[in-house]
Image (cartoon, grey):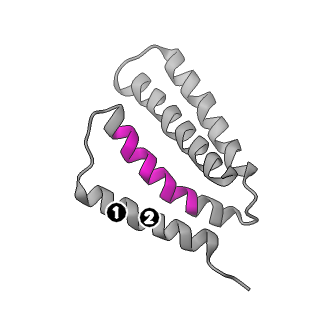
Amino acid sequence: MRSLFLFLAAGLAEIGGGYLVWLWIRESKPWWYGLVGAAVLILYGIIPTLQHFPSFGRVYAAYGGVFIILALLWGWGIDKNTPDLYDWIGAALCLVGVSVILWAPRS
């Protein structure tokens, strides 16, 4: 449960921080949007280090799959861009990949 929470927190920090920077640069929002976005992105860099998995590469590879799902949900909820069937199929494949990366039996 802790791992899932940390993956979700990292994803929301990365997407939220990136979105604030996007708004600042692409939609001419005030400069402090970029500053807050940068601070949130720094937080994103810290959150994955709290995972208990021993391998940096595996944590970030697995996080990538979670990020894809969160990005689709963010786009749907915030940008009102509804994911289609192929988005969901791709996201499901990513979750299968995440499961293999994190929980495959290794010796």
Q: Image check: 26 left or right of 59? A: left
Residue at left 37%, top 46%? 72
Q: In this view of the protein, which residue sits in the foreground, 48 or 18?
A: 48
Q: Image check: 28 left or right of 14? A: left
Tell me which corner region of the image, top left, top right, bottom left or bottom right, holds residue 59. bottom right
- In the rendered image of this protein, does residue 28 appear above or below residue 13? above
Q: In this view of the protein, which residue sits in the foreground, 30 or 88?
A: 88
Indicate whether residue 106 is drawn in magenta.
no
Element marked by disc 2: helix
Residue at left 52%, top 24%? 34
Element marked by disc 1: helix
- In the rendered image of this protein, does residue 61 appear above or below residue 28? below
- In the rendered image of this protein, does residue 43 appear above or below residue 29? below
User: What is the three-letter code of the residue carrying label 2?
Assistant: Cys
Residue at left 45%, top 46%? 70
How many C-alpha atoms fall within 10 Å of the one at disc 2: few (<14), some, or many (≥20)?
A: some
Tell me which corner region of the image, top left, top right, bottom left or bottom right, holds residue 100. bottom right
Report the quarter where the C terminus lies: bottom right
Which mark, by number, is residue 49? none
Q: Main secondary structure of the magenta part?
A: helix
Farthest-out residue, bottom: 107
Which mark, by number, is residue 90? 1
Where residue 86 appears, as percent x and y from the top left, is 25, 60
Where residue 13 appears, as percent x and y from the top left, is 57, 37
Q: Image check: 71 left or right of 31? A: left
Q: Which residue is mark 2?
A: 94
User: What is the three-letter code of the residue carrying label 1?
Assistant: Gly
- In the rendered image of this protein, does residue 21 appear above or below residue 75? above
Where residue 105 appears, as percent x and y from the top left, is 66, 81
What is the span of residues highlighted in magenta in the rendered image? 62-75
